[in-house]
Image: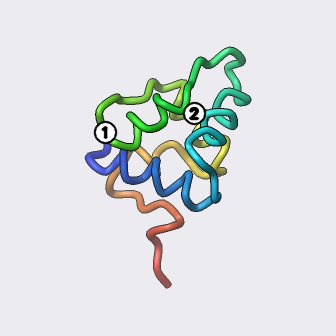
Amino acid sequence: MSSNLAYKLRKVRQTYGLTVVEMAKELRGCEPVGLEISAEMVRRFEAGTQEPSEAVLMAYSKVSHFPVDSLTNDEIKPFFEQRD
């Protein structure tokens, strides 16, 4: 798992201009249906005090439209860190 995962998850939310409440709602709307994600959980993911499950990482991928690998692998830079 990425040592920068918490930072990357926060950047995903910030890139899309979402609050933690809005991010939790977006994540709950992703497959698999029934993901129980609260705003407090999003805060803990972003603080690095709780590691998200694979299903939650898949939901982040669907919301952000980039691969899970860019979140979980520090050797792959997500779009918000890439430079020309």
* Residue 50: quadrant of the picture: top left
Q: Secondary structure at mark 1?
A: loop
Using the image, determine if residue 40 lies above or below residue 61.
above
Query: Are circles 2 and 1 on residues that touch, CB within 8 Å?
Result: no
Along the line of sight, the residue nearer the viewer: 44 or 7: 44
User: Disc 2 or 1, which lies upstream in sequence?
Assistant: 1
Specify the amino acid type for callout 2: Met
* Picture quadrant where residue 20 is located: top right
Residue name at image x 35 percent, y 29 percent: 51
**Mark pair 2, 1: CA separation:** 18 Å
* Dot label at residue 48: 1
| Position of 21 relative to 56 (above/below) | below
Q: Secondary structure at mark 2?
A: helix
Q: Position of residue 27 (x, y in %)?
A: 64, 33
Position in image of residue 39 (x %, y %): 54, 32
Lateral position of residue 68 relative to residue 17, left or right: left
Q: Residues within 10 Å of mark 2 (few under 14, many from 20)?
A: many
- Which quarter of the rendered picture does the N terminus lie within? top left
Residue occupied by mark 2: 58
Residue 37 place in picture, x, y as percent: 56, 24
Residue at x 46% of width, y 45% of height: 69
**Amino acid type indicated by mark 1:** Gly
Q: Which mark is residue 67?
A: none
Q: Name the residue: 46% across, 80% down.
A: 83
Front in this rendered view, residue 2 or 69: 2
